[in-house]
Image (tube, rainbow, N blue to C red):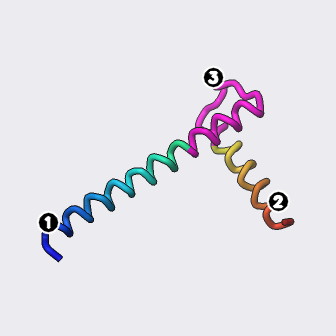
Amino acid sequence: MSQNSLEKQEAKLQQLNQKIKDEKSKIEQRLGKQIISQANLDYANLSNENIKSISKKVAEFLKENQAHN
């Protein structure tokens, strides 16, 4: 393979990796928004401490449900 071909493949790989990162970020944002919306939480009251606590509770709940399925 020529150097130019390898560079093109590397550029495509970097683009794909960026698309994956972007999609993960979108999913994380949508998930967070849905949890906040469904729980009727007020953005003004969500400190980092509250966010961590809620995240931990949701994660524990999901893990427990996966273990039962």
The extreme right residue here reads 68
Which residue was labeled with disc 1? 4
Disc 2 marks a residue whose amino acid type is: Asn
Distance in Å between CA atoms under marks 1 and 3: 52 Å
Which element type, helix, strand or loop, lies under badge 1?
helix
Residue found at the very far bottom of the displayed protein:
1
Quadrant in which the N terminus is drawn: bottom left
Q: Nearer the viewer, residue 62 or 23?
A: 23
Q: Nearer the viewer, residue 34 or 7?
A: 7
**In the structure shown, which secondary structural element does the residue marked by tag 2 occupy?**
helix
Residues in magenta, as a range: 27-51
Is residue 40 inside the magenta stretch? Answer: yes
Discs 1/3, front: 1
In the drawing, does residue 49 fall left or right of residue 14?
right
Q: Tag 3: Cα neighbours inside 10 Å, few (<14), some, or many (≥20)?
A: few
Alpha carbon of mark 3 to alpha carbon of mark 2: how far? 30 Å
Which residue bears the numbered disc 3?
A: 44
The quarter of the picture where residue 3 lies is bottom left
Q: Which residue is mark 2?
A: 65
Q: Is residue 29 above or below residue 41?
A: below
Mark before the other along the chain sequence, 2 or 1: 1
Q: Distance from label 2 to label 1 (Cα)?
A: 50 Å
